[in-house]
Amino acid sequence: MKISKQAKVEARRLFRECSVNGRFDENRARQVVTLLADQQPRGFLPILTQFQKLLKMDDERRTAIIESASSMTPDYQAKVQGDLTKIYGNDLKFVYKQNSVLLGGLRIKVGGDVYDGSVQGRLEALQESI
């Protein structure tokens, strides 16, 4: 479904209104969605669709997915969390995954940023350079 420019603008405005002191407030978002669903203004479905996309992007921006070849010790997890918190702020959520394909090292994804320090990533980079 193609979303009009006006629907995108309106969704961004609503998303900004859901922020309190620079942080997203889930209760305000629920109120916005409920209000839109109840009132059903003209073109509310594209607005809700775009609003949902903005929510998903914001959630991805605040989630760190940390992949490792083997399980990480609690001390190492705390160090990684501390380093990422310094870069991205305190409201970051951490998701740990075990991926044996990596062979060793870590792959960290926060929003659109990917830090690949895995053996697999280095081997792929070496293969591409040859």
Image (cartoon, rainbow, N blue to C red):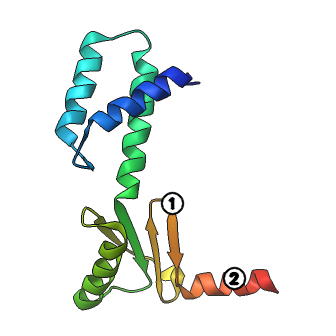
Q: Residue at x 47, y 88 (%)?
A: 105
Q: Secondary structure at mark 2?
A: helix
Residue 122 in the image: x percent, y percent? 63, 86
Q: Are marks 2 and 1 in contact (CB under 8 Å)?
A: no
Name the one closer to the observer, 53 or 12. Answer: 12
Is 81 on the left or on the right of 51, as rendered?
Answer: left
Give the image quarter of residue 51: top left
The kind of residue tagged 2 is Ala
| In the image, farthest residue toward the right | 130
Residue 39 in the image: x percent, y percent? 27, 11
Report which residue position mark 2 lands on.
125
Is 23 on the left or on the right of 106, as rendered?
Answer: left
Earlier sequence position, callout 2 versus callout 1: 1
Q: Nearer the viewer, mark 2 or mark 1?
A: 1
Residue 119 in the image: x percent, y percent? 57, 88
Against 33, residue 24 (above or below) is: below
Name the one closer to the observer, 86 or 44. Answer: 86
Give the image quarter of residue 99: bottom left
Quarter of the image that includes the C terminus: bottom right
Q: Which mark is residue 59?
A: none
Q: How busy is the neighbourhood of tag 2: few (under 14 within 10 Å), some, or many (20 plus)?
A: few
Quarter of the image that includes the N terminus: top right
